[in-house]
Amino acid sequence: MARILVLGAGLAGLTTAMLLAGDRHEVVVVERDPAGPPPPADTETAWNDWQRRGVNQFRLPHFMLPRWWHLVREHLPEAGDALRKAGAGELNLIAMLPADRRGPIRPGDERFDTVTARRPVLEAVLSAAAGNAGVTIRRGVAVTGLTTDGGARVPRVTGVLTAGGTAIPADLVVDCGGRRSALSSWLQAAGARAPAEERDDSGFVYHCRHFRSGTGELPVAKGNLLHNHDSLSAITLPGDNGTWSVVLATASRDRELRGLREPDRWHAAVARYPMVAHWADGEPISGVDVMAGIEDRYRRLVAGGEPVATGVVAVGDAWACTNPSVGRGASMAMIHAVLLRDLLREVDPADHDKVARRFDEVSTQVVEPLHRGTVWQDRHRLAEMAADAEGRSYQPDDPRWSMAKALFAASLADPDLARGYTSLTAFIATPDEVFGGPGVADRVVALGMGAPRYPLPGPSRAELLAAVAG
């Protein structure tokens, strides 16, 4: 057993803490925001009143992918039961598709099951579940730096410093501070070398609105949850207790679409997309919230083959973060947290150098390819949207992008390929696994290569701009 300090009581921090507490480690979570959640059953207070000023996306849309739900059911079943009890939306990404596209439901389609909820409801439920699992959560504690053993080249982190001037000791510090993590500056202030980092603006802007149904029923899904169109992507995300959200994602450089910040223009644009328009017919429970300035970032705490410090690791968005429109962040954090839990079963936390090196190894082997694949997809989609704005067709040299586009088009006509495409969006299969299936590549080429660039019904760019202009 070790005393483990987890920084941040968000989704990554709470699930990581529960996994580690399940192995009888003494786990303390410190969170700078002072307000705690209401009881899990009080979902409306969580949505309307709970303030988490340290999380800028707290009331922005979230969706939990089947990959996340599979891991929760396997490793944290009590938390999964609590989410269901609180009214989390239970759905199956294949069963949601029109029957003429997916065909009959098949054995094995349960792999597309998931549950999902609004972010405040998720955190309220997981906070209570963490407390029940023996995790101590200390709110209103702002971490300002790290304590170390004074080692010159590779210091060992021994705890954290707080804004109140006190130190909290730990055998291992786990940074789950998310996109805003200050770990790099804390390490350098403590005398460590800078971590190896890559940073870039993700390039997307999200225009989001939440809705509620008077009947508790969700709108009928006419396709997958994410629809790519000329100049923007439309995303429809079920939530908990008869709520959902609609997102219009644009390129941050596309100034002509900035009018989507205004509710009337946002609704005028949504109305132009036949497969999405009815999702905006519910009762609005938010304005049009805008999220921009989001970074793609990748951080390694091993540089030049040597840890920059020991006694500390980063999990989830504190380690690597990407564009949130594909919803992979929580799943990658859960994968990462399971890797840490399993590593600490094999390596004594007191062997701090080995923990640092081995966690870097498994992170780069397992999670980094998922991060790189997401960034690859984002770069191509941004370039495609830029081409849309210039009135030209995007035709990169990378054949993988052409095959990815063709797979979606082919999935509209082939139930097997509908499952292949949805397994990618569900984060339960890799492109190599999908395209490696017998005859898949040939069927994709035959059915999808000659399809329109955007096979779903929607406006041209000129029609979209006219709607946004009012």
Image (tube, rainbow, N blue to C red):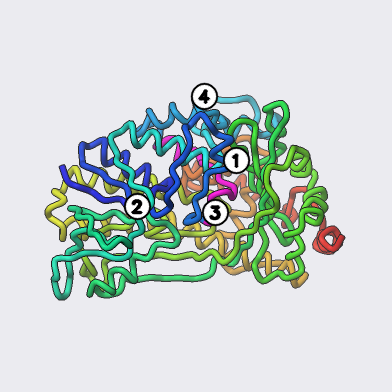
Q: Amino acid at mark 2?
A: Val
Q: Does residue 428 show up magenta in the picture?
A: no
If you read the primary sequence from the N terminus, does the residue marked by circle 1 or circle 3 appear first?
A: 3
Closer to viewer: mark 1 or mark 3: 3
Q: Secondary structure at mark 3?
A: loop
Nearer to us in this view, 331 or 350? 350
Q: Is residue 61 visible?
A: yes
**Disc 4 vs disc 2: which is toward the camera?**
2
Local SS, label 2 = helix
Q: Is residue 228 above or below residue 221?
A: below
Q: Tell which circle, 4 or 1, labels the residue nearer the N-terminal end.
A: 4
Which circle, 4 or 3, is nearer the viewer?
A: 3
| Residue position for label 2 | 366
Residue nearest the viewer, comparing 246 with 161? 161
Between label 2 and label 1, give the one nearer the viewer: 2
Rendered image: mark on residue 107 = 4
Q: Residues within 10 Å of mark 3 (few under 14, many from 20)?
A: some
Mark 2 or mark 3, which is nearer to you?
3
User: Which of the image's four quarters has the N terminus?
Assistant: top left
The amino acid type of the residue labelled 4 equals: Pro
Image x and y of residue 96, in percent:
64, 32
Q: CA distance from mark 4 to mark 2?
A: 28 Å
Precedes in sequence: disc 2 or disc 1: 2
Residue 18, image quadrant? top left
User: According to the image, label 3 marks what residue?
Assistant: 57
Instruction: Where is residue 353? Give x, y as percent.
Output: 15, 60
